[in-house]
Image: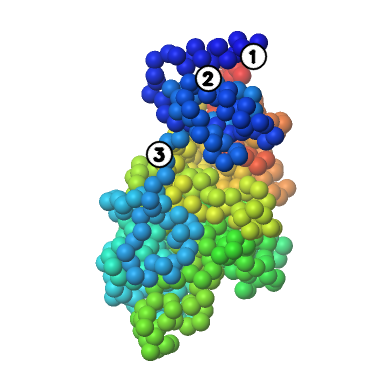
Amino acid sequence: MKRLVLAAFVLALLVPAQASAGRFAIGIRKGADETAVARQVQAVTGEPVTKIGPFALSVRARHMGDLHLLKGTTWVERMHPMRQLAFTPNDPLYNRQWYLGRIHAFDAWSQLPTLGSVRVAVLDSGVDSGHPDLQSQIVDGRSFVSSSWETDTNGHGTFVAGEIAAATDNGTGIASVGFPVELLIAKIVRSDGTISPDAEARAIHWAVDHGARVINMSFGGVRDPHDKGLDTYSPLEAAAVQYAVSKGALVVAAVGNADSAPTEPWSYAGYPAALPHVLGVSSLNRDGTVPNFSNRDIRYVDIAAPGDSIFSTLPRSLTASSRPGCLLQGYSDCGPMEFRRGEGTSFSAPQVSAAAAVLFATDPSLQSDQVSNILERTAADSNPDTGCVRCDVDRDPLTGWGLLDIGSAVRALGDPLPRADRFEANDRPSTAATLWGRKGQRIQATIDYWDDRDDVYKVKLNRGQKVVALLRGPAATNSDLFLWKPGTTAIGGSVANLRYLAAQSRSRGSVDRIKLRITQTGWYYLVVKVTSPGWGRYTLKYRKRPRAAFRAIRR
């Protein structure tokens, strides 16, 4: 039998060479005799075999065939010329930016590519608009407080702006992740360091209306689901963020530091990170651990980035008054101690914002939910093997999907992309996607247990009609389907809300079906909800017919 199998392999390899011909690495199963495996491979390929240590072999072959089925082998890998030298900026202070190497900021290119510009809004304390590393990067600005956006007495906004868009490879100062970025500066921080929801909301609208594809918010308020007196949820902030999402902007926010929380670490991401569709960013130390100041959250921590010993730009007036004899005026080494340490989730979020801008610049057709999906799913998992002993394998409350990896994210653009959801942000009745069609419609969209649990669709139904809806949710998830009556303002929750529930299907698994005769004319709400960890694409079909013509949708 072994001879027949071997003969089959030999015949397969005698056919004319295919495009996949090349050199292959063949893994040796633990405990296997490497010499015996090498003999088998040489007999099949007719080529000399090279050992790569005690764990793998290298051989030239016309194609992979079924080499992985040979006794004692565990995997076969075509040895593409996949690795290349990463681009290194010529900025003299680049070697102080340890975090750029950790997130593989330039690993996707051997030379810095020429990309179209992408606007990123920095909602913060203003900026030193004449800073030599920033002045050419700023396209517009506006203040929503009493002082000019072109001055920054706090320093926070200039620090964040430098991480995102300091001029790269210009032989001056530092490099930034977001080399194709044009900055929109929105000053919202008052002289006492506080931010009013009104200023924040107006700044978000201004940024979106001025073309921001990414909005960076390195600030937050405490979230406490168990103490409404401490919780800082703002409907005004939520509505402004919803506006940005509905216009296609990607909102990135720090999950918050536990400074003002009851305990440190704190188990809830702050606002606005804890709002739908906001990409919440936590911090990692240089050793891979998660600092105690970085808020945890099982749902709203989406991704992590370095947040320790970050080096960036500062207002020159601040560094001159802080350390007049310092040789790095305009940079954080010459600033107050809190900036010389450069720690906080405030300084993690800008790296993700800049990474998002790079993806938008590389492929301008991308939608914001595709970009957040790519960044999350290409992140490098944080777990005990990487230094985070409290992190679970895969998604966890400390780092979300893991450490930002820009190189992997850019390379993922060459793979099939996650499909965009054209109906977002339809998370509640007030922002429901309106469906038209006299007889019904077939909808394809996406759902995500962590970022997008509910999708709401508004449908006009008449008394006497019968409606049937069928949901096929993402595979390996549990999804449910609901129909809510006219007058619904909130889905789920209180007993008062539940009186508006018209029908529901909460079957186990991803297939749900509703069939109902309508007794009241008006706008109804079809709600798709994912109730178990998972994400993916779903199909929702509904039909509405007069009573006599009613037909069920077949499964």
Q: What percent of the width, then of the height, locates residue 140?
A: 29, 65
Question: Callout 1, which amino acid?
Answer: Lys
Q: Quadrant of the N terminus?
A: top right
- Name the residue that disc number 3 marks: 81
Are the two marked residues, 3 and 2, in contact with CB atoms closer than 8 angstroms? no
- Name the residue that disc number 2 marks: 44
Residue 2 numbered mark, or none: 1
Q: How is the image coloured?
A: rainbow
Q: Residue at x 58, y 31 (%)?
A: 75
Q: CA distance from mark 3 to mark 2?
A: 24 Å
The residue carrying pointer 3 sits among few (fewer than 14), some (14 to 19) or many (20 or more) residues within 10 Å by Cα, namely few
Q: What percent of the width, then of the height, locates residue 510?
A: 65, 30
Q: Nearer the viewer, residue 502 or 252?
A: 252
Q: Nearer the viewer, residue 93 or 501?
A: 93
Q: What percent of the width, then of the height, locates residue 31?
A: 70, 34
Sooner in the amino-acid sequence: mark 3 or mark 2: 2
The residue carrying pointer 1 sits among few (fewer than 14), some (14 to 19) or many (20 or more) residues within 10 Å by Cα, namely few
Q: CA distance from mark 2 to mark 1?
A: 12 Å
Q: Is residue 182 above or below residue 332?
A: above
The residue carrying pointer 2 sits among few (fewer than 14), some (14 to 19) or many (20 or more) residues within 10 Å by Cα, namely many
Question: Callout 3, which amino acid?
Answer: Pro
Assign a secondary structure to mark 3: loop
Question: Callout 2, which amino acid?
Answer: Val
Assign a secondary structure to mark 1: helix
Q: Residue at x 62, y 32 (%)?
A: 34
Q: Tell me where residue 545 sits by quadrant.
A: top right
Number of marks in the rendered image: 3
Q: Residue at x 61, y 55 (%)?
A: 386
Q: Residue at x 57, y 28 (%)?
A: 38
Q: CA distance from mark 3 to mark 1?
A: 34 Å
Sooner in the amino-acid sequence: mark 2 or mark 1: 1
